[in-house]
Image (cartoon, rainbow, N blue to C red):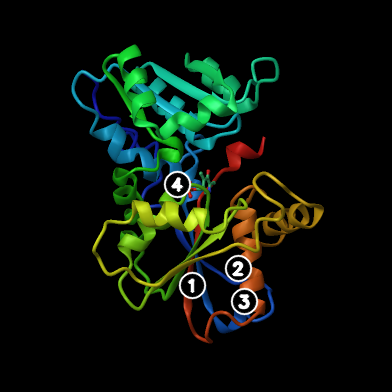
Amino acid sequence: MTSPISLHDTGELLLPSPLQPFHPDWPGADKLNLFIKRDDLIHPVISGNKWRKLKYTFNALPAGCERIISFGGGFSNHLHACGFLCALSGLPFTAIVRGDYSTSLTPMLEDLYRWQADIRFVDKKTYKLRDDPDWLSALSQRYPGSVIIPEGGSQHLALKGVAEIVEECDVEFDHVIVPVGSGATLAGLITALKKPQSATGIAVLKGEAYLESLVENLLPPDTVMPAWQIHHQYHCGGYGKAPEELKAFCNDMQRSYNIPVEPVYSGKMFAAVKDMIANGQFSSGSAVLLVHTGGLQGAR
Ligand SMILES: *Cc1c(COP(=O)(O)O)cnc(C)c1O
């Protein structure tokens, strides 16, 4: 039997994560109350929102769980977090990776090998089967006693962990902003808001309509949700794309405000917020919560 991961009890996780007022020198920002929820500070390895999303899955593994299996790309923060948590809890981990990186390991994959993960490189066509019930049941048969976590940790249990971001906040806010990859973090925040609060996701990849449907599919059915939306004009060319302007913006976040951000997720979110403020998208006097989801290990 596996024991729950007691990172929290050993003081290794910084929770609740710090909530800090943010006063950038951006046009229009002086009329708003901005706060940053520093989930990037939760843990140096487990990227901010990945702990939120995995917490309840790892703490409620069925007795007799012998292995965790999950999916991601070669640079996946999610696989990295899963591999780390498996190593801590002494559980074998199988990472199913989209594309063959065997001759060009990324820093994340190198870590996974160090943590004794079993890495399977699959082609794009096979990877597409990751949610196919027949393929998944064949996978379970091949690895008896395994728990399969979907790509990005995107499952209903993830929402409960993410909702704690809002529960930890002791300030009133009107809007919450977060980057969107698989959509589970945005979905979890939506479930925790009370009308008239609203949520805005910043898409880091090109995927109009598709991202909205990922979020909708995760939300509990038949409940009245607060207003939410995804902005699609801030992905800077797509996932992992980092034009010079964005890199300069990330450097400036560090230099001027002492907030480390990376160009894949958090940099795009902060740059979007700067633009939204300049365009008058928040009414004067509103309080806006910016969720810093971490990802700094991924900037290597
Ligand atoms: C994975 C990740 C996200 C995206 O979260 P989703 O729940 O997949 O939308 C955002 N920020 C960082 C730093 C991440 O690693």
What's the CA distance linking mark 4 and mark 2? 19 Å
**Circle 2 sits on which residue?**
273
Image quadrant for the C terminus? top right
Q: Position of residue 63 (x, y in %)?
A: 18, 22
Identity, as a three-letter code, of the amino acid under mark 1: Val
Identity, as a three-letter code, of the amino acid under mark 3: Ile
CB-based contact (under 8 Å), mark 3 and mark 1:
no
CB-based contact (under 8 Å), mark 3 and mark 2:
yes
Q: Residues within 10 Å of mark 3 (few under 14, many from 20)?
A: some
The reply to whether residue 165 is in sight is no
Q: Earlier in the sequence, mark 4 or mark 3?
A: 4
Instruction: State which quadrant residue 102 falls in.
Output: top right
Q: Earlier in the sequence, mark 3 or mark 1?
A: 3
**Circle 4 sits on which residue?**
49
Some atom of ligand 1 lies within 8 Å of the CB belonging to the residue at label 4: yes
Some atom of ligand 1 lies within 8 Å of the CB belonging to the residue at label 1: no
Residue 288, disc: 1
- Relative to 34, is 169 above or below? above
Q: Earlier in the sequence, mark 2 or mark 1?
A: 2
The reply to whether residue 271 is in sight is yes
- Relative to 35, is 119 above or below? above
CB-based contact (under 8 Å), mark 2 and mark 1:
yes
- Relative to 71, is 50 above or below? below
Q: Secondary structure at mark 3?
A: helix
Of all residues, the one furthest to the bottom in this rendering is 284
Q: Earlier in the sequence, mark 4 or mark 2?
A: 4
